């Protein structure tokens, strides 16, 4: 298996990274803003692999530099450094799971300032950026591309690396339920399980653990859900906010799993959760049951993602935001 590359005949990612490792160069790895299990799993796994090969590695993600509780147990998470602690002109910058430069926040300028920038991603909306690209929209998760890179670098997969890769793989495939899951996805999963990882424990930590307050939040949020069968192939939407999460004693990250409940609505092809942020913007999650390409909707509204899962940030008010989504779905 080789990682798909769209950078043509230039240097390969494995070439750039193995040269960097052999020369003891400084490599900065950066996950997307508000990183999820795929972003952090791929960042931490590649960081560990490069470290083992001799590189000086700094792994980071943009502000707010706060790890969600569901991910702070990932091996190596304690070694992540805040964006202010990375050199502004590293030898190599690696962007992981970021659909666009904007998803790197204040670290985006490093794409140009680094000696070489390497972009590892799987979003259909990725416009193509960075000097060397490992971008495969057919990949179910960025961790699958990192697994290929680790193979190319000659790094053996052990339980530490497998834990990181499995976290990203199971998260982005919805535990192997989504259409993006392919035969080779299960082949990789089998390889990872073969290292002896406790996959049930990983899944429990990632998907089946939340404070009691989450039940009350879920009740409030599902209680105000609206079903609009006349919009596109049907729209179900609701909203919450970091402030409402706080009322239930929850950090804002607990808003992320709400859409996974909302999207089960049979009458609506598209599910949407508006998540009010501290700065007054709405972080919007879109999901499709199959008929609608929500990455098109998200891209039209300034965001991106995949056909079945996408998002964007809105500065309009709640009604204006949902009206913009309705208008795009009606197209
Ligand atoms: P979320 O609803 O936040 O879980 O995001 C769903 C998918 O859309 C993920 O693959 C995200 O990386 C992507 N996504 C979310 N927000 C944005 C954005 N503002 N720009 C680009 N991609 C996004
Ligand atoms: Mn992600
Ligand atoms: Mn991903």
Image: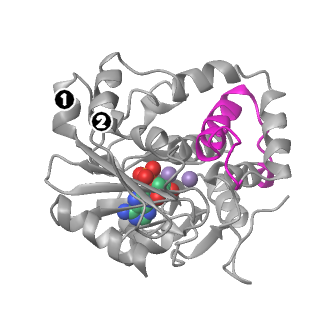
Q: Which residue is drawn at 21% across and 39% down?
A: 242
- Indicate the quadrant containing the N terminus: top left, top right, bottom left or bottom right: bottom right
**Is 167 above or below relative to 265?**
above
- Is residue 331 inside the magenta stretch? no
Circle nearer the N terminus (2, 1): 2
Specify start and end residues of the magenta stretch as a single range.
151-180
Q: In this view, does 21 lie to the left or right of 107?
A: right
Q: Which of 218 and 6 is in front in this view?
A: 218
Mark sitting on residue 223: 2
Q: What sort of colour scheme is used for the picture?
A: one colour
SS at circle 1:
helix
Tally the marks: 2
Residue at horizontal 71%, vertical 42%?
176
- Kindly identify which numbered label has been placed on residue 246: 1
Residue sticking out furthest to the front = 230
Q: Nearer the viewer, mark 2 or mark 1?
A: 2
Ligand 1 closer than 8 Å to the CB at disc 2? Answer: no
Determine whether the residue tagged by mark 2 lies in a helix, strand or loop.
helix
Spot the residue most to the top: 212
- Could you tell me which quadrant the C terminus lies in? bottom left
- Whether residue 165 appears in magenta in the rendering, the answer is yes
What percent of the width, then of the height, locates residue 321? 24, 65
From the viewer's perspective, tell me whether residue 147 is left or right of residue 270: right
**Quarter occupied by residue 70:** top left
Q: Is residue 188 above or below residue 98?
A: above
């Amino acid at each position: 298996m080789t990682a798909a590359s769209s950078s043509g005949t230039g240097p390969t990612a494995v070439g750039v990274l193995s040269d960097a490792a052999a020369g003891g160069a400084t490599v900065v790895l950066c996950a997307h803003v508000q990183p999820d299990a795929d972003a952090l799993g791929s960042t931490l796994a590649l960081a560990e692999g490069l470290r083992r090969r001799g590189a000086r590695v700094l792994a980071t993600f943009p502000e707010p530099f706060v790890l969600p509780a569901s991910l702070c147990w990932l091996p190596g998470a304690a070694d992540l450094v805040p964006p202010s602690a990375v050199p502004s002109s590293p030898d190599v910058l690696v962007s992981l799971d970021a659909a666009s430069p904007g998803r790197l926040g204040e670290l985006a300028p490093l794409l140009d300032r680094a000696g070489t920038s390497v972009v590892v991603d799987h979003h259909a909306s990725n416009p193509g950026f960075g000097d060397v690209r490992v971008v495969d929209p057919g990949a179910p998760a960025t961790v699958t591309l990192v697994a290929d890179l680790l193979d190319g670098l000659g790094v053996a997969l052990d339980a530490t690396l497998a834990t990181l890769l499995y976290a990203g793989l199971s998260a982005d495939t919805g535990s192997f339920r989504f259409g993006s899951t392919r035969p080779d996805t299960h082949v990789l999963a089998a390889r990872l399980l073969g290292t002896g990882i406790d996959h049930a424990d990983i899944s429990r930590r990632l998907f089946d653990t939340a404070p009691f307050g989450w039940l009350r939040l879920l009740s409030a949020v599902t209680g105000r859900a609206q079903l609009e069968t006349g919009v596109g192939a049907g729209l179900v939407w609701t909203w919450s906010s970091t402030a409402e999460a706080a009322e239930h004693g929850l950090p804002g990250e607990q808003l992320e799993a709400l859409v996974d409940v909302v999207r089960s609505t049979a009458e609506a092809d598209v599910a949407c959760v508006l998540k009010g942020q501290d700065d007054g913007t709405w972080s919007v999650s879109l999901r499709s049951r199959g008929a609608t390409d929500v990455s098109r909707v998200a891209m039209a509204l300034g965001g991106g993602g995949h056909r079945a899962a996408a998002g964007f940030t809105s500065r309009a008010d709640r009604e204006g935001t949902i009206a913009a989504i309705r208008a795009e779905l009606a197209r």
